[in-house]
Image: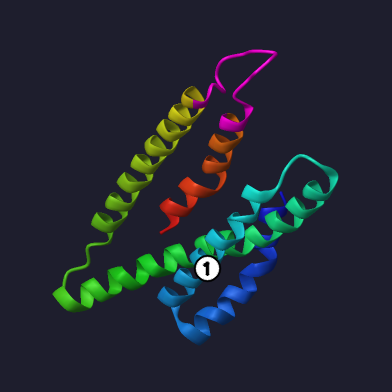
């Protein structure tokens, strides 16, 4: 919820960033800040101070989230317009079709990654006494930071 609230608050800032440095550079900057803002989640643990810090971290994650929400349709429009100017044919449906395919593929990849992490770390097996808690924590932190950072690049 804090990330979404941060995204709403940061949206007007992205409008100013776009006017100053452009859509492409603004998106790249926003995605870079999103990757950087995900990293502190790896360092947090389960105590009161970490819970308070996690609220701040999730609010800052909203900056990157708002960048993705703000720039994605604008960058699609820029690419489609540039293609139409260069080749004289407007192929917006083709671009949006490929975009939909990539979204479907990314969802399958995300679900598959979660399956392999949970089954590989022992998360999926119920046990009152678990001896691989470190492995489970490492897998969850990889799902929180590592894989989203790779996907954002």
The picture places residue 145, in percent across and down from the top left corner, at 54, 49
**Which of the two residues, 21 or 76, is positioned nearer the viewer here?**
21
Q: Residue furthest bottom?
A: 20
Front residue of 44/84: it is 44
Return the residue nearer the eye: 102 or 64: 64
Magenta stretch: helix, strand or loop mostly: loop
Magenta-span inclusion, residue 132 = yes
Q: Which residues are magenta?
A: 121-135
Which residue is drawn at the image coordinates 57% and 59% (left, top)? 65
Secondary structure under the numbered disc 1 in the rendered image? helix
**Could you tell me which residue is drawn at 65 percent across and 55 percent down?**
40
Q: Which residue is mark 1?
A: 30
* Residue 153, position as x, y percentages in the image: 40, 59
Other residues around mark 1 within 10 Å, as few (<14) / some (14–19) / many (≥20): many
Give x and y (percent) for residue 139: 54, 35
* 42 drawn magenta: no
Residue drawn at x 38%, y 46% is 103
């Amino acid at each position: 919820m804090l990330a979404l609230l941060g995204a709403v608050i940061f949206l007007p800032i992205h409008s100013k960033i776009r006017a100053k440095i452009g859509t492409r550079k603004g998106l790249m900057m926003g995605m870079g800040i999103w990757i950087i803002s995900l990293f502190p989640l790896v360092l947090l643990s389960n105590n009161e101070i970490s819970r308070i810090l996690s609220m701040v971290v999730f609010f800052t994650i909203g900056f990157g989230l708002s960048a993705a929400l703000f720039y994605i349709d604008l960058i699609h429009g820029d690419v489609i317009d540039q293609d139409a100017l260069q080749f004289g044919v407007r192929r917006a449906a083709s671009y949006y079709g490929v975009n939909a395919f990539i979204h479907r593929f990314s969802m399958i990849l995300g679900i598959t990654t979660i399956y392999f992490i949970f089954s590989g770390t022992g998360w999926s097996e119920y046990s009152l006494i678990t001896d691989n808690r470190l492995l489970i924590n490492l897998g969850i932190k990889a799902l929180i930071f590592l894989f989203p950072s790779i996907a954002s690049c």
